[in-house]
Every structure is written in structure tokens, then in C-alpha cells.
Amino acid sequence: MSINFSADAVCDAALCRIANGEPEALNDIYQKLGRQIYMLAYSILQDTHRADDVMQETFVRLLSGAKSYQKGTNAKAYILKITRNLAISELQKRSREELCEYPIEESVPDTDAPPLSCLESLSLLRQDERIIVILKLDCGETHKKIAGILGISTAACEKKYRRALEKLKEYYKD
């Protein structure tokens, strides 16, 4: 019988091990959250290469900053917030004109990633809506946790989520 530990518990233990000089514990975080980290970065950046870069930078930050993590806090939210902040910083580096020049990528490097048509439909959503949809549907986060990551109220998060789903339903209705 195998035991399925929660991502938060696994990541909490891994961050503590990294802080104690065991960098190989990053693999545990990658196994539990790698896809979610990538999808969050992609939902913000809409570029597979830049999402890969943010994913790698997230792991670099985890390795270098694990000592600042407080054991027992929400490790998953801590990691996803690092990813979100890095992705937003990357996005801010580019001017609006540069962002418009990037086409939607033809493929997503992760074999478990959703089909391209799904990713294209996410481009219909505003950035905050994309983040909420990815964190809710792909990462399984609660509205309360998502609201905490984004720094908004739970009610606002729920409202944005409902609006985003309505936009996606309309897109797929045609």
C-alpha cells in the first residue's frame, strides 16, 4: 500500500532538507509541483521558453532561499508565489510592443500538458483570470489559497473565476 503525501507536506519537508544542506530534495518539489509551477508561469507569460526559464529560476531561488522558509507554513503557496512573482517580473521586463510580437507556441514541452487548443483558449482571459483558472483547475487550489497568492479577497477570486469560466464556455460553445 502506497501513501500519497500531500504536496504541501512533501514540499515543507523538502524545503527544510534543502535548508539543512540537502539540495537533492529539490527533486521532491519538482515531482510534486513541477507541472503546476510550469503552468502558472505559462499562464502569465504565454511563452513556453520564458515559462521554462521562470521554472528554472524558481528552483534556483528555492535552493538559495530555503533558509528563509518557515517550517510548517504553506509550502505549496510559498513556492507558487515565488513562481508568480518571477513570472510577473519577467513580464514587466518586456514592453507591450515586444509582447505582441510573440506568437503562441506550437507545442508545450511537458507531455502531461494540456493540448494547445486549451492553452490558446486561455489567451482569451485576462492575466489574473488565467492565473486563477490554472491554480484552481490544474493545481487544485482553493479560492482562499489562490486569493492569498494573488493578494485579493476570496470573494473577488471566486467572482473572477466564474467570469473566466463563462468566457471559456462561450469560446467552446461556438
Image (cartoon, helix red, strand yellow):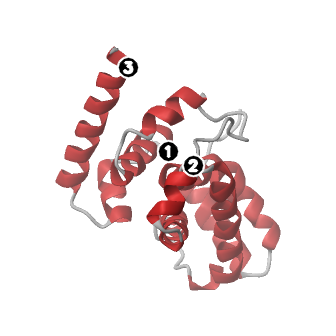
Q: What quarter of the picture does the C terminus occupy?
A: top left
With 164 as the anchor, is 3 left or right in this view? right
Mark 1 neighbour class, 10 Å CA radius: few under 14, some 14 to 19, many 20 or more: some
**Badge 3: few (under 14), some or many (20 or more) residues near its Cα, within 10 Å?**
few
Residue annotated with mark 3: 172
Element type at mark 3:
helix
The structure residue drawn at horizontal position 48% and vertical position 68%, both measured from the top left corner, is 95
Above or below, comparing residue 40 to residue 150 in the picture: above
User: Who is closer to the viewer here, 55 or 101?
Assistant: 101
* CB contact under 8 Å: marks 2 and 1: yes
Q: In the rendering, at what x and y percent does residue 127 appear?
A: 38, 53
Q: Secondary structure at mark 2?
A: helix
Residue placed most toward the observer, 145 or 21: 145
Disc 2 residue type (three-letter): Gln
Residue positioned 61% across, 51% down in the render: 38
* Residue under the image location 57 percent in, 58 percent down: 9
Left or right: 93, with 31 as reference point: left
Taking 49 as reference, is 21 left or right? right
Closer to the camera: disc 3 or disc 1? Answer: 3
First in sequence: mark 3 vs mark 1 = 1
Q: SS class of the residue under badge 1?
A: loop
Mark 2 vs mark 3: give the one in front: 3
The label on residue 129 is none
Residue on which the image places disc 2: 36
Q: How many numbered marks are there?
A: 3
Image quadrant in which you'd find residue 107: top right
